[in-house]
Image (tube, rainbow, N blue to C red):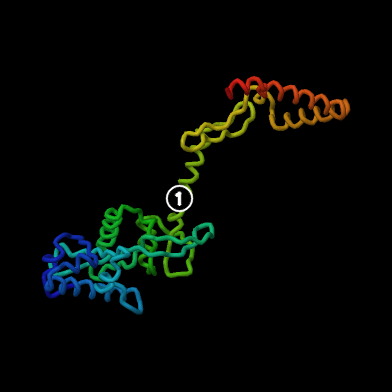
Amino acid sequence: MEFDFVVTSICRDLITVWDGTTIYHLSPDVRKQITAIINRMGAASSRAQGLGAIITTTSRLCMNVHTGQRLYLYRDPKNEKKVCGLLKIGRKKLFLRDNVGRMRELNASCVLDFYVHESCQRRGIGKALFQHMLKAEQLPAAKFAIDRPSHKFLAFLRKHYKLGKFTPQNNNFVVFDQYFKAKVKHRKESSKLNLQAFPAGKSTGQVRAPPLPFGSPPATRNARDSKLPNSTGATRRMKSRRANAFDREGSGDSVSKLLSSSMEISRKLTPSNSFRASHKV
């Protein structure tokens, strides 16, 4: 799309990035020119996609600074008055259903608008613009939610990034299955590492538990209990045998013996009266 002023004086690089803060700090003349570029390109994008409203304007960029909306513009390297394409991204809080049917609330990075002018298509501009955005944002293409993608955009992603399978959502966003597969793969790898770090014991064949947090030593059994396969069960059986022996010997004699022994122990532990008197003096 051509303009009646020199675009290279505003967009000095081949691909430039704009947001509400950058536009706000421009001089009035430059702000007027960049506003004309963004508004006209946004209107052309809405017409090409068959949208009922223009979704990319300068005012929208300025109102959505808090969501991190940024606009990438690609100017024509051969024509100093021509802009070829735009790509708008931002973050949105979305309720999405993953590839296993679970509903999730995510603050996702989104592609909100993507357009290459009809006179500049079939020249690799879309791939160069999209690839530049991925490198600047440091995210793969699968980690973006796409807002109302056209058939051309879906074919573009399938051709260049092998993205084709997605779960239908209740909203207008398309999230590919690879968005969630990366997290599932990470959990599988972590579980494998845990099994390798704590292999199965030779005697029981069970997986050993990892150490407690903060370096706390796990509770250990004493040497007598460690010889038993189940110290708790063995202790219960031993108490049961003693109780049965107590019943067989007769409760009266056993109780008297216990009382006499306890009284003898208490006399030994209690200090004598002479000892108390000497300390009082």
In this view, the residue farthest toward the bottom is 52
- Using the image, determine if residue 238 lies above or below residue 148: above
Disc 1 on helix, strand or loop?
helix
Residue 108 is left or right of residue 66, and the answer is right
Specify the quadrant that holds the C terminus: top right
At 38% from the left and 63% from the top, the residue drawn is: 155
| Nearest the eye: 224 or 106 | 224
Please name the residue shown 49% across and 62% down the image. Answer: 97
Q: Is residue 230 above or below residue 187?
A: above
Amino acid under disc 1: Lys
Residue where numbered disc 1 is placed: 183
Give the percent coordinates (x, y) of residue 239.
77, 30
Q: Nearer the viewer, residue 175 or 243?
A: 243
Query: Where is residue 261 shown, x and y percent of the image?
Result: 77, 23
Disc count in the image? 1
Apparent side of residue 48 relative to residue 4 in the rendered image (left or right): right
The residue positioned 45% from the left and 46% from the top of the image is 186
State the residue in front, 173 or 93.
93
Quadrant of residue 153 in the image? bottom left
